[in-house]
Structure formats: structure tokens, C-alpha cells
Image: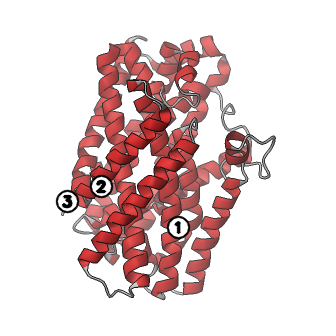
Amino acid sequence: SISGRQNGFALAGDYMSAASFLGIAGIVSLSGFDGLIYSTGWLVGWPVVLFLIAEPLRNLGKYTFADVVAYRLKQTPVRIAAAIGTLAVVVFYLIAQMVGAGDLIRLLFGISYELAVVIVGLVMLAYVLFGGMIATTWVQIVKAVLLLAGAALLCVLTLAKFNFNPLTLFAEAAARYGDVVLAPGKQVANPWDAISLGLALMFGTAGLPHILMRFYTVPDAKAARQSVFWATGLIGLFYLMTFILGFGAMVIVGQEAITSVSKAGNMAAPLLAEALGGTGLLGFIAAVAFATILAVVAGLALSGAAALSHDLWVSVYRNGQSNAVEEMRVARAATVVLALLAIGLGVLFKGQNVAFMVGLAFAVAASGNFPALVLSVFWRGYTTAGAVSSIVFGTVSSLVLIAVSPTIMVDIMKMEEAWFPLKNP
């Protein structure tokens, strides 16, 4: 097993995805202050994990989200519902990573976005099929260190241009793009949208299947608590840096240059690296970002495959009468299916901001998985019908509202207006 501190680094590595690095820096570089909603929302989710989830999960000693929820209830219906919840979150999260990776490979090698997404999907497939859970834990730890180092280096180089005074940087941004970049309301103008997004980011963390899996790799509840402390500190530091990077890209690279490469601003951080340190630094930051994407995608693919093989195939279809070899075979097949799905959807969602896409995954996790998880841990009177209906209703309603929201109807289907007004239902 792994110590609390190591697991804290691995948790931080799992959590600091392409969305945090590429997406938040991108949103900040294009709409200024509003990018902070994502950083704050994602950080505030961790105390929720610490006080509500970390210890009970470790004490139960269960492996997947479905194991925890089905613990005292009828297995079959609960497992089917939980697998649906897990897969919905995993697929949305995967799309975001694919979009980020596609943009990145296109920037580096000048190949088409579609081809880039296919390449990333195949690399991820190879990585998951030949790796496994412990392999990915060490990748996450190394990656967390590299990502923090890369972001810190960019921050120092950015601030060096402004005499190490962030206020000079903000003043320069305001001078160039108006005071609106230092005030809220450019990205999220509707207060209901802000509340909806904030709640999703805050409670979504505690419903993420690939984060929950990590509490299984530590020896006891104390180590589980420690790992959340470490993760929170590292993630908070990282989000402070992405804010500086976003404003740095806005001033040093310029918004026109950023949108000319990626409309959603996903490439703000790599372009900033190129402006500050030439192609060498661009190469390093791009490599770190790509490693980030691969590692997160691997964790996601593992939890998606576990939902299909462990929760559906073994526990439901075979009623627990299955051997390890067969379960592995099903898990591998599931990984292939997930990879193909991720490639297809990654191509479809071209041009979306990756932080925004991950926000949708959090909306699904907060609506479907989080309530079921908390109730199953703390409420003795929780019934099978209650668990199934809370997961299915939460997941399906959030998916339907996303489908009729401006994100899908206006941005992707190019319709005049959407049936539902909120961008983050």
C-alpha cells in the first residue's frame, strides 16, 4: 500500500487534469476574473471529501462507487444504476481530456484535430491495457510533481516581466482589455448559472468515481485523511498559479493570438510558454500537459472499465460467479469500447473549452452520484428504491438538461436558442 502523503500527491495528480491546466488558464486569459469560479469551486470540493467521504469510504474497504452504495441494499438494481452514473461522468470527463489533447497535438505537430484525437485515443488504449492501478498511481505522483514544477516555472518567468508584482500584471491587463477583465460577469453573467455551476463543482468532486477509487490504496482512515490534506494544499497552490498564467497569457500572448489557435482558449498556457522560453519551454510544457491528459484518461478508463466488468458483468450478469481471468477479459473489452466512444465524442465536441466540459461531468456527478453516496454512508433508513431513483433521476435529469442547454443546442447543433437557459444545469 501507499502512504498518506504519496496518495495525496496521486490524488492531486488525478485531479489536476488538462481541464485545470489548459482550461482554467484559457478561461482566465479570455474572460479574466470569471475563470476563478472554476478554481474556487474545484478547490472547495475537497473539504467536502475530507469531512463526509474519506474516512467512511476507507473504513468500508470497498472498491468502486457501486460497492459503497450497494453495501447494505439489494445488489442488482443498485449496481445497474451506479454503473450508469459512473459511466455518464467518465464519458463527459473523457471528452474534455480528448478535446484538450487534440488541440495540443495539433498545435505541436500541425496535423488535423481529428487525426490528433484518434492518435491520443490509441495511445491511451495501449497505456491502460498494459498498465494497471499501481502503475497509474506512480504515474500520477510523478505527473503531479512535474505539473507543479512546470506551472511554477511559468509563473516565475511571467512575474519576472512585471517586477514580481502581480498587481502590475493585473493593471496591465485592465489597461489593455478594460476593467471588465477584473470584474465578474463576463463568462457567467446569470446569477442562477453561477450558483448552479458552483454547486456542481463543489459537490461533484465527492462523486467522481476515479477519485473515490484512490481511498482504497491507503492502509487506514488516518492515511485517507492525510492524503486529502496533502491533495488540498497542492491543488490550492496549483490553482493560484493557473490564475497568474491566465492573466500572463492575456497580456504577453494577447487574446487575438490565443483565439486564433483555439477558439475556446485551451492553448493559452502552451502559447505563454512559447512566448517566454521559446520552443524548448513549449515542448516541456506540452509534454507535461500531454502526460497529464494521458494519466487522467487512464484513471478514467480504469474506473469506467471497472464499472462495466466488476459492477455489471460479474455482479449482475454472472451473479458473482466469475473468475479473475474472465473479469480481466471483459475489462479489456470495456476499455476498447470506451476508447472508441471517447474518440468519436472528442471529434464532435471540437472547439469547446476543456474546463467547461469537465464542469458538465461535475454537474452529472453532483446530481447523481453524490446524494446517493452521502445517504448510503449516513442514513440507516436508505432503501434500494431510494438509491436507484436518486442515481437514475439525478443522472438522467442532468443529462437531459445538458442536452437542451445552450451548450449542445446553440454551440454544437447551431440552433437559434436553447430550450433550457442555464449553461451548467
Among the two numbered marks 2 and 1 on one chain, the one whose residue lies closer to the N terminus = 1
Residue 259 location in percent, x, y? 57, 23
Q: Name the residue: 62% across, 78% down.
A: 389
Residue 177 location in percent, x, y? 63, 16
The residue that label 3 is drawn on is 2
Q: Is residue 6 left or right of residue 289?
A: left
Is 92 located above or below residue 396 in the figure? above
The residue that label 2 is drawn on is 128
Q: Which quarter of the picture shows residue 416?
A: top right
Tags 3 and 2 touching, CB below 8 Å: no
Mark 2 element type = helix
Measured in 3D between alpha carbons, the distance from the residue under mark 2 to the one under mark 1, in whole angstroms, is 22 Å
Is 295 located above or below residue 73 in the figure? above
Q: Nearer the viewer, mark 3 or mark 2?
A: 2
Residue nearest the viewer, comparing 237 with 283: 283
Q: Which quarter of the picture shows residue 129?
A: bottom left
Residue 364 location in percent, x, y? 57, 59
The residue that label 1 is drawn on is 85
Residue nearest the viewer, comparing 109 with 23: 109
Mark 1 element type = helix
Q: Name the residue: 43% across, 20% down.
A: 272
Measured in 3D between alpha carbons, the distance from the residue under mark 1 to the one under mark 3, in whole angstroms, is 28 Å
Mark 3 element type = loop
Q: Nearer the viewer, mark 1 or mark 3?
A: 1
Q: Amino acid at mark 3?
A: Ile
Among the two numbered marks 1 and 3 on one chain, the one whose residue lies closer to the N terminus = 3
Q: Residues within 10 Å of mark 3 (few under 14, many from 20)?
A: some
**Could you tell me which quadrant the C terminus lies in?**
bottom right
Q: Is residue 164 visible?
A: no
Q: Any mark on residue 305, and which? A: none
Q: Amino acid at mark 1?
A: Gly
Q: Name the residue: 53% across, 42% down.
A: 347
